[in-house]
Image (cartoon, grey):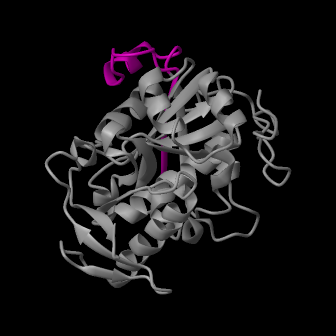
Amino acid sequence: MGAGCRPHADAPLVNPRDGVENTRMATDPATFLARFAAAEIGAEPLSFQLLFFDPPALTEAGLLAALAPHLPGVTVELLAVAGSPEAASVVSADGPPASALGLIAWPGRVVKLVTFDAPMPYGPVEACVGPALIPPPMKVDAAQHRAHALLYIAGNGPEPLEGYTALCAVAGALARFGGIVTLNEEARTAVPAFDLIPDEGEDALQTYRTLPTPYLFGGFVRMDAGHAGNWVRTFACHRLGLPNLAMKMTEPDHGRMAFQMFAGILGYLRQVGEAFTAGDLLDLGDGTKFTLRVPAETEWFLDSPGPLFVLEPEA
């Protein structure tokens, strides 16, 4: 495993046997499955995915211990699929078989959890991990992962930012069980799993709310567009009611500068609630100015389900 990719000392792995029997069957299967099925996720739910070194030994008590200090009123229910034949009725037959189902709830929030004692399909992993701004050894660990989990916001859902905040909270708890990276497949991005583990006494939900948009909610991707050159762009910012942004790179080492610039622009839009239109002039100070335009027909690689603006530098 890649050196330096385990959680830091302030975020120890959970021992599932600390004061609790290691069982996933504390919930009556029929009652749990009825609630799990009733917690509908809709056609396009907000979702995160986690990759693990090994199949995580999850327990209700272990997850509760990680979540309760930051989420008053949280409840955790887990059910092993292998111990409940009825679970097959609520698990898709596509892909590897699920190993456990979970419901994590607190006032106004319900997160559905599905774990798999098998790797996640290569395609979405590479699409998220390949361009991610994470250490190369962590990318190797991610490629060699042996288990994964899916998280979904259930019900009608809260406002999107609050939905992402809820997913971050559960992902941070799961990270203590040997998580490598947390993915947002729709946004084509990945971050170190332990980055979402809150410090003791931290206002975790507020920290998650103020994460830079391109960090996890709207992915930041560097792209080689062939004859069109090298580009950077965001994905899935429309989920937060924001436009995606794109820019052609003139220097290969300007990726982090572009990330910070995109984060600042999107953060400003989140804060003030303004909207861009094509032709707007952005003055970022220090003589840095950009004009916004929509993608040209030939820029197919900038396709976006919502608005996308290309930043053209002013001469």
User: Residue lying farthest left?
Assistant: 297
| Residue 315 spot, x, y in % from top left | 35, 76
Residue ID at (45%, 85%):
287
Residue ID at (81%, 46%):
12
Residue 88 can be seen in this image: yes
Where 108 falls versus 233 (above or below)?
below
User: Residue lying farthest right?
Assistant: 9
Where 268 falls versus 76 (above or below)?
below
Residue ID at (59%, 68%):
207
Q: Of residues 290 and 234, which is closer to you in this image?
A: 290
Residue 274 can be seen in this image: no
| Residue 156 spot, x, y in % from top left | 26, 54
Q: Of residues 314 and 67, which is closer to you in this image?
A: 314
Q: What stretch is highlighted in magenta?
A: 81-105
Locate the N terminus by quadrant: top right
160 lies left or right of 262? left
Q: Is residue 211 magenta?
A: no
273 lies left or right of 171? left
When asked about the image quadrant of residue 41, the answer is: top left
Residue ID at (76%, 36%):
20
| Residue 245 spot, x, y in % from top left | 33, 61
| Residue 262 spot, x, y in % from top left | 44, 66
When asked about the image quadrant of residue 193, the answer is: top right
